[in-house]
Image (cartoon, rainbow, N blue to C red):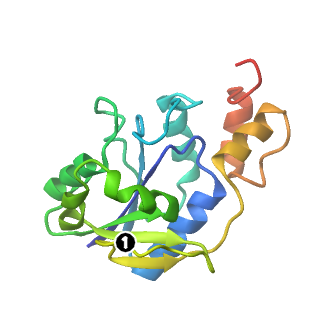
Amino acid sequence: MRRGIFGGSFDPVHLGHLVVAAAAADRLLLESVHFVPAREQPFKAGGHAASPEDRVAMLELALADERFVLDTRELDREAPSYTVDTLRALRAEFPADELCLMIGADAARDLPEWREAEAIPALARIIVLTRPGAEMPGLEKVGEILEVPRVDVSATEVRERAGRGEPIDDLVPLAVAEYIESHRLYSAGD
């Protein structure tokens, strides 16, 4: 079985995450894609705006594709979240499966600085997801560079629009927009 590993803050999960993951799953013939929300990312200071419980709830609402799997193992460990630890756990759980670590171009540039970066290629094939026409610097240990559809949405934009009380249902699945509104996530003063 071929599994994709797609980690991030998912604060909140948005349509860009889902479109990119589906495109990668199709192109790489992945039977499943593990969405792995991070407890605390070493390269992102300041923590998350939403709690781990809210981020998990939004992912549960968003992951309608039968190939998508919510994987909370990083939330179950002490911070910070290191990809190498997640990959080792997945390798132990699924020893016969091919693991494909899917990362964005920005994260790929930081890859040499990741904890035990040299161990990652032995645990998973590294797939860099990039937008059409984007320049990608040559990196050692990258298994493949995969162009995925350009989706102009970011979690920052979602949080800012929600904070101003503007509609976000064009940026996130409807159920996630309703969750954000009903739980007053990202609202100014919260």
Judging by the rendered image, the residue that carries numbered circle 1 is 139
Image position of 83 with respect to 148: above or below:
above
Image coordinates for residue 20, horizontal then vertical, percent: 56, 67
Q: Residue at x 52, y 28 (%)?
A: 51
Say few, some or many: other residues with alpha carbon within 10 Å of mark 1 (under 14 / 14 to 19 / 20 or more). few
Image position of 154 with respect to 149: above or below:
above
Name the residue nearer the viewer: 47 or 32. 47
Q: How many marks?
A: 1
Query: Label 1 sits on what residue type?
Result: Leu
Name the residue nearer the viewer: 67 or 19. 19
Of the 4 image quadrants, the one containing the N terminus is bottom left
- Residue 43: which quarter of the image? top left
User: Taking 32 as reference, is 10 left or right?
Assistant: right
Q: Residue at x 72, y 49 (%)?
A: 174
User: Taking 116 as reference, is 49 left or right?
Assistant: right
Image coordinates for residue 14, horizontal then vertical, percent: 63, 52
Image coordinates for residue 189, horizontal then vertical, percent: 75, 18
